[in-house]
Amino acid sequence: MKSFEILLPEGPIIIVAGRNAQENFDLIDEYQSYARKYPACNVTWFHLDAFPSGHIIMKCPPGILPDSDHIRIAAEYTKNNTKYKN
């Protein structure tokens, strides 16, 4: 899996991407487990609609909601890691 962080004073927003089918399945499991374990954290899942793509999750620090820039970054990362990026 690939990941990167958007640094905030409250803690990092972590964006994780699956690079193949197995990593996508692992990421779905991680998404569900993390959401149950940390209900105060906002976890958002990204995937292209109607096209094959990697799965992307964005995990925010407790009590922090992503703003439109963070959502755009994760959405563009989702698109740019597919053959549909143009």
Image: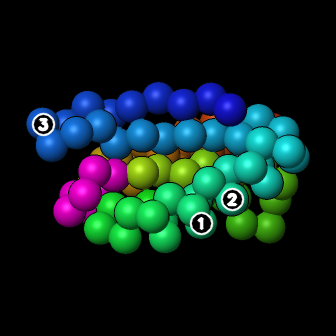
Q: Relative to residue 8, is residue 24 drawn left or right?
A: right
Residue visible at 22% across and 39% down?
Answer: 11
| Residue 46 screen position, x and y as percent | 59, 58
Residue visible at 15% across and 43% down?
Answer: 10
Residue under numbered circle 2: 29
Magenta span of residues: 60-66
Q: Is disc 1 in contact with disc 3, using a CB cutoff of under 8 Å?
A: no
| Residue 49 screen position, x and y as percent | 71, 66
| Residue 66 screen position, x and y as percent | 30, 56
Spatial CA span between label 1 and label 3? 26 Å
Residue 32 numbered tag: 1
Report helix, strand or loop for mark 3: loop
Q: Relative to residue 18, is residue 78 drawn left or right?
A: left
Which residue is at the front of the view, 77 or 25?
A: 25
> Label 1 is placed on what type of residue?
Gln
Q: Residue furthest front?
A: 37
Q: Residue furthest left?
A: 9
Residue visible at 55% across and 52% down?
Answer: 57
Residue 53 visible (yes or no): yes
Spatial CA span between label 1 and label 2? 5 Å
> Above or below — where is 19 with respect to 39?
above
Residue 81 visible (yes or no): no
Residue under numbered circle 3: 9
Label 3: few (<14), some or many (≥20) within 10 Å?
Answer: few
Which residue is at the front of the view, 75 or 44?
A: 44
